Amino acid sequence: GCAGNAGGGGGGGEGDVLTVGFAQTGSESGWRAANTESMKEAFSEENGFNLIFNAADNKQEAQIAAVRSFINQGVDAIVIAPITVDGWDDVLKEAKDAGIPVVLEDRTVNVDDDSLYASWVGLDFEKEGETAGAWAKETFTEPTNMVVLEGTTGSAPALDRATGFATGSEGAPITTLDSQTGDFTRDGGKKVMEGFLQKYGDSINLLFAHNDDMGLGALDAITAAGLTPGTDIQIVTIDAVRDGMQALADGQFNFIVECNPLLGEKVAEVVKKVVAGETVEKTTIVEDQSFTPEQAKEALPDRKY
Ligand code: AHR
């Protein structure tokens, strides 16, 4: 169960067990499932943690409420994978006033005062977008019509991947016909792609999906429209989860930029240090690779998620 013990600091006998509240975004994607598993593994009892896990179903208000409840329970530390970049100042200030350190994982926030969180362990989303854009620029030398499936509106990966793609593809003969959010879900990707296909039909040459899951949902829509994904419409996505890598190996996707979800161990290490009062890096960026169909075939047998 997730019901919390009141946090550490207190009664004897428990040794160094750290009670940590983790406010996860939700369970929108395969990436998220892998990230949750990585966090639960790293914040296990064997590793000296009592983890209170909350998933907010991608609703910022619910996530902020979860953080408030962690503060009320007097946890030793709070970890947040912030759904959106904005809206965090008040609750982070409440945590600070309560003397509870906050570590961000995966996504980051926009706050006026950086001391409101101790550390961020995450990914370079802008570079991911730039790598995807550079691939598009290299691949498309003739006039090309693109549609975009954006991630959750106002989230760091959606904002930064859009910026990065524009930089990476600068100067390429690519026109953006449309760009809408599919909220990082398969269902969202499918529905929005159906709309794109109704509107633009076979004039679409390229799809940039901000994550694999939306790209996978779009495959159904493209096939249902009588088009061949990977050929009629080339597809570039971000994440490199197993299902995405399989689609790439099968020629339905054309390129994937990785986003590494296995952040748990690093986050746990940072949390232990922060609680012990040691200095930590303000920012830790985990490296990402990228994959062509050939590389996906090679990598698939050993892929962990
Ligand atoms: O913040 C990382 C993003 O969130 C992943 O790319 C996406 O799949 C997830 O939902």
Image: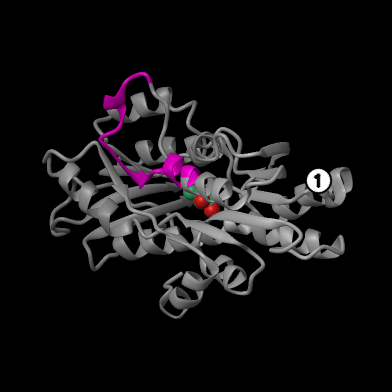
Q: Is residue 124 magenta?
A: yes
- Residue that sits furthest to the bottom in the current view: 301
Q: Which residue is mark 1?
A: 196
**How far across and down, in percent of the image, does residue 174 sit?**
66, 40
**Apparent side of residue 3 relative to residue 276 in the rendered image (left or right):** right
Note whether 239 is above or below 103 in the view shown. below
| Total numbered badges shown on the rendered structure | 1
Instruction: From the viewer's side, name the closer residue of 84 and 182.
Output: 182
**Apparent side of residue 20 relative to residue 167 in the rendered image (left or right):** left
Q: Which residues are magenta?
A: 112-130
* Label 1 crowd (10 A; few <14 / some 14-19 / many >=20): many
Instruction: From the viewer's side, name the closer residue of 277 and 194.
Output: 194
The residue that appears at 42% across and 38% down in the rendered structure is 67
The quadrant in which residue 108 appears is: top left
The residue that appears at 26% across and 54% down in the rendered structure is 266
**How far across and down, in percent of the image, does residue 52 sit?**
38, 53
Helix, strand or loop for disc 1: helix
- Residue that sits furthest to the front in the current view: 142
Instruction: From the viewer's side, name the closer residue of 116 and 157.
Output: 157
The residue that appears at 13% across and 58% down in the rendered structure is 15
Tell me how the rendering is colored.
one colour
